[in-house]
Image (cartoon, helix red, strand yellow):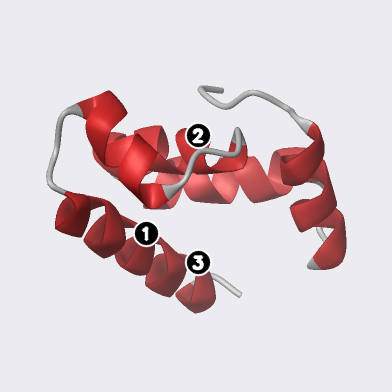
Amino acid sequence: MCFDLDIPCVLMAKAIGESVLDYLNKIEKASSSLERKIFDCFMKGYKSKEIAELLNIDIRCVYNAKYRLQKKMDKSK
């Protein structure tokens, strides 16, 4: 598993009624490496602009990756 089990992640999983590990497994299977990195940073509390600077990518890449991951997770319900 490539994600840290931190408090926001646990709360998000509980909010959607899944176990944390099930939720993270779905994300890991559905996402690209960039999407996983962005998700991990997001769950640690970084803002989109900070993630872009940290990963040395354009902020639009962050927005697009978050959008793609959200769509993938909506399909897996």
Mark 1 is on which residue type? Lys
Displayed quadrant of residue 45 = top right
Quadrant where the N terminus is found in the figure: top right
Is residue 41 at all visible to an observer of this figure? yes
Gap between marks 1 and 2 measured at Cα: 11 Å
Front: mark 1 or 3:
1
Classify 32 as above or below 55: below
Residue that carries the numbered disc 1 in the rendered image: 66
Query: Do residues under tags 1 and 2 come within 8 Å of each other at their CB atoms?
Result: no
Q: Residue at x 17, y 53 (%)?
A: 61
Q: Residue at x 35, y 37 (%)?
A: 51
Is residue 17 at all visible to an observer of this figure? no
SS category of the residue bearing label 2: helix
Mark 3 is on which residue type? Met
Residue that carries the numbered disc 2 in the rendered image: 40
Quadrant where the C terminus is found in the figure: bottom right
Q: Earlier in the sequence, mark 1 or mark 2?
A: 2
Disc on res. 73: 3
Q: Residue at x 51, y 48 (%)?
A: 27
SS category of the residue bearing label 3: helix
49 horizontally vs 28: left or right: left
Q: Earlier in the sequence, mark 2 or mark 3?
A: 2
